[in-house]
Amino acid sequence: MIYSRITGTGGYLPEKVLTNKDLEKFVDTTDEWIVERTGIRQRHVAETQSACDLAEIAARRALEMAGKAPEDVDLIVLGTSTPDLVFPSTASLLQGRLGIKNGGAAFDVQAACSGFVFALSVADKFVKSGVSKCALVVGAETMTRLMDWNDRGTCVLFGDGAGAVLLEASEEAGILSTHLHTDGAYEHLLNVAGGISRNSEALLEGRAFLQMKGNEVFRMAVNTLGRIVDETLDANQMSKSDVDWLVPHQANIRIIQATAKKLDMPMERVVVTVADQGNTSAASIPLALDTAVRDGRIQRGEVLLLEAFGGGFTWGSALVKF
Ligand code: UT7
C-alpha cells in the first residue's frame, strides 16, 4: 500500500497589513464589532503581488523543509478563486516560475474556500495510485481584489496569502482519508457574479465583487462542518479523542469554536490564525498548518483533522497522520 505523506509545509503573507482601525477610516464599522463577531483583528494585502507570486514563496519554503528541489516535483495542484489569469492556470505559471522542465501535470482546482482540501484530495489520489511521487499542493489567494470596499458585510473579512505542502509517496501512513462534497444549489448565498462567459461586463467594469449573505452562510457552515467531522471519524473508525489537532478553514472564530465543541476539543488543540490573517480562502488551512508545524505545536505522528466550507457550496475534510 502506498500512502502520501506531508514532508514539508510553507506559507507566505504579503507585507502590507490592514488593521480593523484602518478599515474604520473608510467603512462604517468598528474594531469592536469585527473582533466580537469574527475574531479578526487584521489581514494582509497583496498590493502588487499576484497569487502566483505568493504561491512561489510558500512552495519554495515547503520544498526547503522537505529537503527537495523543484525538479523533484512531478505534480502541482493549486486551489484558488483568484487566479493570475484566465489561462494558463496559476499552477502552470508556478511550475514555470519554479523552473521545472518536462514536469508532470500542473492544474488549478476551483472550490472557493475548500480549494486546498479539494487540491489535497486530488493530489493524494495521484500519489496513492502511483502516478505521482512528489506533489506540491498549494492554496494561494488575493481575495482583497474581489472586495467591494463599501460593503462592510464582506470587506472586513478577507485577506491575502498562500500556503503549500509537499506530498511524497511513502510506505508510512500519511493522509488517512479525504471527504469532499458540493451542493450547487446555493449560488445566491455566496458568489462573485462576474466571469468570462456570464456577466463579463461586471468584470470589465470593475464591479465583479464577492457577495455573501453572511448570516445564512454562517448557519450552513456550522451545521455542515459538524456533519463532516462525524463522517471523517466514522470512515476511519476513530473517535473524537484520537484527533490531536483541528486545523480548520479560518472564516470566523465562532464557526471554528462550534466545530471544536462538536469534537469536544479544547481551543488549545485548535490552530487559529484568523485574528492575524482574516479569511484567506483556499490559503487558510495550509497557512495554519505551516504556522503550527513551524512553532513546534504539531509534531510528527500526530493526527490532524483539516476541514473547510466555502462557496459552491463546497466542503471537505482530510484526516492526516502527520
Ligand atoms: O469562507 C467562506 C464562508 N464564509 C463564512 O463562513 C462567513 C460566514 N458568515 C459570518 O462569518 C458572519 O455571518 C458575518 C461575520 C459575515 C456577519 O456576522 P453576523 O453575526 O451573522 O451578523 P449579521 O450579518 O446578522 O449582521 C448583524 C448586524 C447587521 O445590522 P442590523 O441589520 O442588525 O442593524 C449588519 O448590518 O451587523 C451589521 N454589520 C456590521 N456592523 C459593523 C454587518 N457587518 C458589519 C460590520 N461592522 N463590518
Image (tube, rainbow, N blue to C red):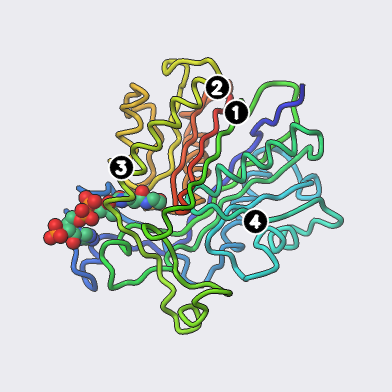
Question: Mark 2 or mark 1, which has the lower sequence index?
Answer: 1
Q: How many marks?
A: 4
Instruction: Tell me the distance, in whole angstroms, between the alpha carbons under discs 1 and 3.
Output: 25 Å
Instruction: Tell me the distance, in whole angstroms, between the alpha carbons under discs 2 and 3.
Output: 27 Å
Residue 184 is at least partly visible in this image: yes
Name the residue tied to disc 2.
Answer: 235
Name the residue tied to disc 4.
Answer: 108
Query: Would you say the residues marked 4 and 1 are in contact, meaning their CB atoms lie under 8 Å apart?
Result: no
Instruction: Tell me the distance, in whole angstroms, between the alpha carbons under discs 2 and 4.
Output: 27 Å
Residue 33 locus on image (x, y percent): 18, 54
Q: Is residue 72 above or below residue 32?
A: above
Residue with the most extreme right position: 102
Name the residue tied to disc 3.
Answer: 253
Left or right: 29 with respect to 185? left
Circle 3 Cα neighbour tier, 10 Å, few/some/many (<14 / 14–19 / ≥20): many
Query: Would you say the residues marked 2 and 3 are in contact, meaning their CB atoms lie under 8 Å apart?
Result: no
Residue 157 locus on image (x, y percent): 33, 57
Q: Amino acid at mark 2?
A: Ala
Nearer to me, 183 or 275:
183
Q: Ligand 1 appears in which quadrant?
A: bottom left
Q: Residue at x 79, y 46 (%)?
A: 74
Question: Mark 4 or mark 3, which has the lower sequence index?
Answer: 4
Q: Amino acid at mark 1?
A: Ser
Circle 1 Cα neighbour tier, 10 Å, few/some/many (<14 / 14–19 / ≥20): some
| Circle 4 SS class | strand
Query: Would you say the residues marked 4 and 3 are in contact, meaning their CB atoms lie under 8 Å apart?
Result: no
Name which quarter of the figure residue 7 lies in: top right
Query: Would you say the residues marked 2 and 1 are in contact, meaning their CB atoms lie under 8 Å apart?
Result: yes
Kindly tell me whether mark 1's CB lies below 8 Å from ligand 1: no
Question: Mark 2 or mark 3, which has the lower sequence index?
Answer: 2
| Circle 1 SS class | strand
